Image: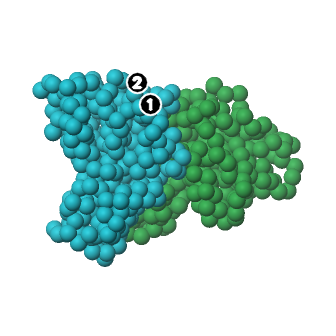
Chain colours: A cyan, B green
């Protein structure tokens, strides 16, 4: 047993899809969340900048006495974590491995689609990880750079979201994928639109939620789950505390008033 | 006469609409441009963060021996410059005053529309500046937060841009404005769509271009124009040199190869 908190971070709000799942399946755990709202989005930045920002985010979480880090950001998980894991003396898991394992287990046809940011797709890490699990898998990747702005501006339904999603997803439909990894933690907020376009027969893998499930397994294996029945969460952001408080409250369906704090991430 | 360069900055690429105008009307001037591509967009950030980023951008440009700064960013011009101008011992002009003067001179009906980012509209500075010029003006402001992502992702035409623009601009059409200030330097790239929706009778004011015209007047008044016939530009960005080089080249219709450099803006 280990009652120290779990650290979770994302470039912004998307990682709350992972927080929600952690609260659901590990309700006793304390959580320290960091959302880099002052530098969001990560997905359109260069590989070097994504590396730098990810290192700072991890160093900030390390200042708390945490037992485990979940990178609930598709871009940082794929474009940074594989390159910097060895720099840190800490258990760190991203969304990459959990999502790939789930997708490989689900697919019948062996054709898997991956959608994510430019940074995620450019890294090629989803393709590489799926091929390592099963070299016979066919993987089709597609960057969807407008999805994060759509979500951050509330366009999660309606004609605009549908038009953009239809354009991005057409090549994956044409390829005949039967499983689609939502490789960015913002994308589950567009699940309805994505589901409508891809059709009933295509299974959607929520990378953030899978990371929470995977983290629970890891913590169980190492006997690091907490011994309490009810945990608490503290949220840190690099900009606009009020804005985050409002959206996080709606998203998590409970008030986070008083537990959101500002941090100067450039100091880490 | 003063042959020192002019400094120009924006949160990203939008300020190139101002650079282009400066090159056209003051072809002899040397230019130092900074695009904060590692922290774009500014318009969705808090007032405090916009202030901090703007101070860093000015401090960086001050490290060159420049004679004048143009803030070619609608958000920094309205949400930061009015509050920090007195901190710097340097001639600094934003897009706010030039655009307001132009719009006030153009309007027949006295009804002026202003579109910009959340940060710009929240600052209330366009309204305040127009009212100071003529208290009888009626001003209608509208934040258009999806316009920057549309431009940065190449959606400057077509159905998606039209749908979003129609939604944002409808209240301004309903109000009967005859002059519309494009208060963000990204927006001229959506000029065709905006023009189609607003109609022939509405005059569009390009804040970035007006800032260039205004800067020329100021430099003439103070006898600070350069004495050469042909100037050169150097570009500094806080991320992704290659990406900027490609887009800036297309935008300015000439190669900027070899003149784009990376800077760590957090050090300023």
Camera sees residue B21? yes
**CB atoms at circles 1 and 2 under 8 Å apart?**
yes
Disc 2 designates what residue? Answer: A63
x and y, in percent, of residue B57 in the image: 61, 37
A217 to the left or right of A146: left
Q: Residue furthest left?
A: A229
B28 to the left or right of A261: right
Kindly state the secondary structure of the residue where label 1 is placed: helix
Q: Residue at x 29, y 66 (%)?
A: A112
Q: How many marks?
A: 2
Name the image quarter holding residue A178. Answer: bottom left
B104 to the left or right of A2: right
Q: Nearer the viewer, residue A218 or B151?
A: A218
- Chain on which label 1 sits: A
Disc 1 designates what residue? Answer: A59
- Chain on which label 2 sits: A
Circle 2 packing at 10 Å, graded few (<14), some (14-19), many (20+), is few
Circle 1 packing at 10 Å, graded few (<14), some (14-19), many (20+), is some
x and y, in percent, of residue B100 in the image: 56, 45
Name the image quarter holding residue B176. Answer: bottom left
Q: Residue at x 66, y 66 (%)?
A: B253
Camera sees residue B199? no
How much space separates mark 1 and mark 2, taking CA atoms?
Answer: 7 Å
x and y, in percent, of residue A158 in the image: 25, 61
A196 to the left or right of B103: left
Q: Residue furthest bottom?
A: A174
Kindly state the secondary structure of the residue where label 2 is placed: loop
Q: Nearer the viewer, residue A117 or A247?
A: A117
Name the image quarter holding residue A105. Answer: bottom left
């Amino acid at each position: 047993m280990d009652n120290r908190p779990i650290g979770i971070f994302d470039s912004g709000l998307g990682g709350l899809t992972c927080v929600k799942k952690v609260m659901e399946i590990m309700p006793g755990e304390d959580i320290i969340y960091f959302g880099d709202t002052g530098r969001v989005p990560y997905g359109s930045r260069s590989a070097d900048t994504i590396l730098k920002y990810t290192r700072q985010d991890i160093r900030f979480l390390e200042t708390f006495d945490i037992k485990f880090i979940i990178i609930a950001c598709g871009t940082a998980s794929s474009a940074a974590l594989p390159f910097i894991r060895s720099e840190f003396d800490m258990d760190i898991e991203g969304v990459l491995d959990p999502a790939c394992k789930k997708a490989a287990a689900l697919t019948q046809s062996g054709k898997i689609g991956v959608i994510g940011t430019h940074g995620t797709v450019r890294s090629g890490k989803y393709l590489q990880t799926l091929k390592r699990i099963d070299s016979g898998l066919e993987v089709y990747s597609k960057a969807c750079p407008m999805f994060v702005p759509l979500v951050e501006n509330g366009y999660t339904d309606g004609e605009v979201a549908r038009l953009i999603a239809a354009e991005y997803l057409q090549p994956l439909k044409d390829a005949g994928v039967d499983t689609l990894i939502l490789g960015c933690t913002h994308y589950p907020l567009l699940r309805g639109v994505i589901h409508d376009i891809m059709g009933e027969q295509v299974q959607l893998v929520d990378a953030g939620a899978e990371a929470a499930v995977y983290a629970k397994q890891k913590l169980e294996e190492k006997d690091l789950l907490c011994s309490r029945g009810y945990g608490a969460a503290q949220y840190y952001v690099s900009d606009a505390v009020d804005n985050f408080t409002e959206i996080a409250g709606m998203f998590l369906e409970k008030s986070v008033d008083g537990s959101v704090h500002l941090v100067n991430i450039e100091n880490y």
